[in-house]
Amino acid sequence: MYYLNGGKLLVEPAIIHYTLGPTKPWLWWTYPLFDLNDHWNKARNAMETVYNDPAPDLHLVYFTLLVVVLALLFRKFTLLTIGRFLRSDSLSSFENNFAHYLITWISLFITWNLMQTNAHPFASWIYFTVNLNICIICLSDVFVISRCGGIGTSYDYPRSFVFILNTCVIFLSLLLLSLIPSFGTRALLAIVLLIFCNYLIPFFCKIFLIGRHDCHLDYQLLPLRKECVH
């Protein structure tokens, strides 16, 4: 709340108190949705400069490296222990239609719980995006290798391609939000972009990481009709 005196502010229009459920302007994931995000970020940077506080962003690099190591260990351990027991000739209809959504949602849940609350917004979004891509790629590898023995896509370097595509989608969405001056329009656009990403990122996972799997196709018989050879 603001301290008022005859309809005038006693202090500069800085944020003293803010209530809107769980959406606080100092939380990394609300940036750049609210107009107050920039005020909080500037106030925080000024305070860190005055008190010579170290920026709490460097530790995100170490956490990212830790996530990479843990993801590789999880992938290796899972494939060694239970991968061969889950092998199938082809994916079921449910797996074809929903596996990419489950992989993306599980990755989002893991990444969300790995987030640090004391990092700056831009660094937090980078950390979130990198870890989300790591989890999606790791879980997709575990799924397709354990179920059908390998990735069924025909694209070259599918993991790097998905990493770049997902990163571009997330940061282009953030850039588009930051360019909208009106909060109402920005909030509506945020909902639209959230729904859009909820379909586009799983789509990338399905096309480039999971691909199409039907092991029977590898053993098709030659056609019975003989071609005339002149």
Image (cartoon, helix red, strand yellow):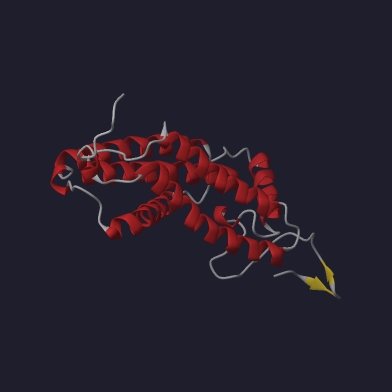
Asked if one can make out residue 24 in the rendered structure from this viewpoint, the answer is no
Side (left or right) of 175 relative to 165: right
- Quadrant position of the N terminus in the picture: bottom right
Residue furthest top as drawn: 230
Count of number-bearing discs = 0
* Residue sitting nearer the eye, 27 or 100: 100
What residue appears at the point 57 percent right and 39 percent down from the top-left corner?
A: 55
- Position of residue 144 measured from the top left corner of the image (x, y, whole percent): 28, 44
* Residue sitting nearer the eye, 67 or 200: 200
- Position of residue 182 measured from the top left corner of the image (x, y, whole percent): 75, 62
Asked if one can make out residue 10 in the rendered structure from this viewpoint, the answer is yes
* Residue sitting nearer the eye, 49 or 211: 211
Residue furthest bottom as drawn: 6
Identify whether 217 is placed above or below 197: above
What residue appears at the point 67 percent right and 51 percent down from the top-left corner?
A: 176
- Position of residue 168 measured from the top left corner of the image (x, y, whole percent): 56, 42
Side (left or right) of 5 relative to 160: right
- Position of residue 119 measured from the top left corner of the image (x, y, whole percent): 54, 46
- Quadrant position of the C terminus in the picture: top left
Side (left or right) of 65 relative to 50: left
What residue appears at the point 48 percent right and 57 percent down from the top-left corner?
A: 199
What residue appears at the point 40 percent right and 53 percent down from the top-left corner?
A: 104
